[in-house]
Image (cartoon, grey):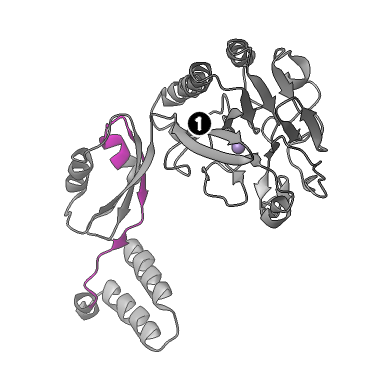
Amino acid sequence: MKFVHIADIHFDIPFTSLSAREGLGEKRRLEQRIAFKKVIEYIKDNDIEYLFIAGDLYENEYVKTSTIEYIINLFKEIPNTKIFITPGNHDPYIKGSYYDTYNFGENVYIFNDSKIKKYEDSKVNIYGMAFTEFYMNESPLVNIELQNSNKPNILITHCDLNGSRDSDGFSYNPILESTLAQYKFDYIAMGHIHKNNLENKNKIFYPGSLISLGFDELGEHGMIVGEIENKTTKVKFVKLDDRKFEEINIDVEKFLSKEDLIEAILDLNLESKNVYKVILTGKRNFEINTREILKAVSTENVLKIKDSTKISYDIEKLCEQNNLKGIFVREVLSLYKNGLCTEEEYQRALEIGLDVL
Ligand SMILES: [Mn+2]
């Protein structure tokens, strides 16, 4: 049997990280649609029998009715493909949700219980579960008993593998990899972690988010295409996101002015399709105001500038000065030399103090 596995599409997410350039958030939401459409086209072109959507298909809070209808209409274009959805923490199966109130079509099976349920047809056994709230502290993925079967056993779930509680004390269906591994599924279709992982020896696969949602999601994004034949599982990754989020480091030490730096950013060989976060490193010889620089760099695809530089000092020269700066530097230096502060604290004190002075 052949299948496509996607997760974490997050339809209609606001894309606040793109707000530095007007209209880009909206453009990106269109790109979500395009990527999703490519999944449907791939299924059509390759006669894929099953589509697994492992949660976070849409943003419960933001998704528009028109987007839901767009999704449903695309599902109708692949009537011979069975579609399985296991709602996640951003699109839980709650009362009044689109999953609850809309008919997604004859070929769509939406898991609606936080306990494991099984769907069975002539080719495959599919186990799945749903988030029925915006978090799930206890995972139901314990004590699963698979019946002996010649058909492949597949689990679909939105799940935080080896996860723990977040800063607010919530968990998202956390389960140990060793627990999942013992059941011997032929394929475990995961969602929740936005970076793809196809290397897992326990057949636990994450496609990652369908398209990158920000600078914390670098690298390639797309879907997993798989085939299980005689209990052998084969997978490949198919890239669907044409735009990449990338980081570029620039050492500022050689620049003498902010104009030099702006010129250097404008001279970068940037891929017009991609968006960039520029990280400034090294020792700086002038004051850096990242907002000002971002404004001056009118390049559409530089969205963020992060200042990780340190001030460049000539400590010896500063010590010789007969003024407040000199007194301050001598004082801090003696604290450091007498072991009364760490090197990091010493650097930080110099930086803050000299900035003020
Ligand atoms: Mn997600």
- Say above or below: 173 vs 12: below
Residue farthest to the bottom?
338
Which quadrant of the figure shows ligand 1?
top right
Indicate the amino acid at tag 1.
Phe
Give yes or no for residue 305 being in the magenta stretch. Answer: yes
Q: Which stretch appears magenta?
A: 293-315
Q: Is residue 33 left or right of residue 99?
A: left
Between residue 109 and residue 171, name the one nearer to us: 109
Q: Is residue 191 visible?
A: no
Q: Quadrant of the N terminus?
A: top right
Packing grade of label 1 (10 A; few <14, some 14-19, many >=20) is some
Q: Is residue 68 visible?
A: yes
Q: Is residue 51 left or right of residue 274?
A: right
Name which quarter of the figure residue 7 lies in.
top right
Q: How many marks?
A: 1
Q: Quadrant of the C terminus?
A: bottom left
Between residue 232 and residue 77, name the one nearer to us: 232
Where does residue 198 sit, x and y in percent of width and height?
52, 44
- Say above or below: 199 vs 91: below
Between residue 47 and residue 98, name the one nearer to us: 47
Which residue: 54% across, 41% down? 194
Say if disc 1 is inside 8 Å of ligand 1: no
- Say above or below: 136 vs 43: below
Where does residue 200 sit, x and y in percent of width and height?
56, 50
- Say above or below: 223 vs 102: below
Q: In what element is the residue under mark 1?
A: loop
Where does residue 121 sit, x and y in percent of width and height?
75, 25
Which residue: 33% across, 62% down? 355
Q: Which residue is mark 1?
A: 15
Where does residue 331 sit, x and y in percent of width and height?
35, 81
Give yes or no for residue 17 being in the magenta stretch. Answer: no
